[in-house]
Amino acid sequence: MRINSRCQKPANSFFSGDKTRRPCFARPMRRLRHALRAVQNHRRAIRGAAALLAGLFLLMLLAPVGGRAAEPPTAADWTQIRRTAEAFVARESPPGILPFENPAAQVLRAAPHTTFAHYFPPYPLSLDNRPADRDAYNRVLLNPNGGRGQFERIGGYLRDRPLPAGPWPSPWWRQINDAIEILRAQRIGLDGFACDLLRVAPGQPFNAWDRINMLMQTASEVAPGFHVVIEPDSAALKAVPAARMADAIATLARYPSAFRLADGRLLIAPFAPENMGPHYWRTVLADLAGRGIQTAFIPVLLAWRREAPPGESAMSTRSRMAPSAAFSRRWNPRPPR
């Protein structure tokens, strides 16, 4: 008796004496399981997006009204900003306090590799320049009942917060806090931040465009050896046209703190670039080249093995990005324990 081991079995396994074969249900059932799994993933994505939007709405509500100073800091202001930040970091991290051996700055600068920490602008040291025990983090974002209790079910919107600093009796408290973060990073041996670019215009939720500009300006003024890698977030900027993306990157490239390789190329490291596809990024890079900005493209891939969309060859994400990339990185989520 011929038997398809995947779909059919001898009838006498179930029905004695009946020699007819059972119909194959394996493939329809497999398709049904895949469809159910896709629905579950879609629902998870919707819930995750809703939580993110609710959190961003909270940040919009917490942003101080009229917080931006009318005029940029003067040279004397930057001197005071730097001195305030240096004094704070020196008090909190005296020599010998770190639990690891920390080579001298000149030794690190001579090292063959550079190290950058991912920086997410919506969560600076302070959102409102208040004492830590009653600031926006403790009052709302860490509080299960904060934000009208919409995150009570999961214990609050956040589980931790940046190490507090301040408050500062200065109109430049944001710059002081940025300088503290930069000097803290230098203190532990980092060369810079890979800063998530979430918006390409001012005045949008939590002023993300203003935040990255302020961070890069502060690094340029306070710590000239500290650099920022521009990391366009393709999840947040998926609808931004290529020309507008190139405008934003060109604007940020003017800061001395924008990180460049030894040959002068501006380093661009988009997060989840597969959301926009290789053609989009080739267009952005060509636009920048037309403005005289030579670039090194290092995609930070989220879907490492996601297949190509319809109309493109069925190669992995990494292979599709390879022609434009100097090399690639993988965003590797921590596995559950």
Image (cartoon, helix red, strand yellow):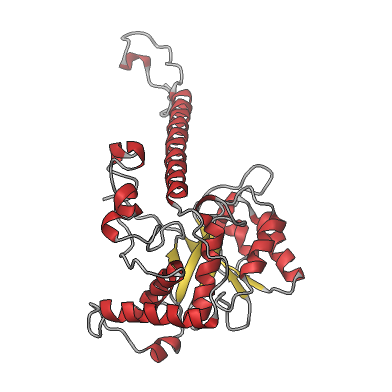
Residue 273, position as x, y percentages in the image: 57, 56
Res. 223 in view: no
Residue 191, picture quadrant: bottom left
Residue 37, picture quadrant: top left
Q: Is residue 320 left or right of residue 104?
A: right
Residue 143, position as x, y percentages in the image: 28, 46
Relative to the observer, which residue lies in front, 77 or 155? 77
Residue 233, position as x, y percentages in the image: 54, 56
Residue 110, position as x, y percentages in the image: 45, 89
Relative to the observer, which residue lies in front, 14 or 123? 123
Picture residue at 32% right of the left edge, 58% below the top: 161
Picture residue at 44% right of the left edge, 41% below the top: 54
Residue 43 higher or lower than 280, as above or below: above
The residue lying furthest to the top in this view is: 17
Res. 318 in view: yes
Residue 295, picture quadrant: bottom right
Residue 301 higher or lower than 312, as above or below: below
Quadrant where the image shows the N terminus? top left
Residue 269 higher or lower than 233, as above or below: below
Count of numbered labels shown in the rendering: 0
Q: Is residue 177 left or right of residue 90?
A: right
Picture residue at 23% right of the left edge, 77% below the top: 99
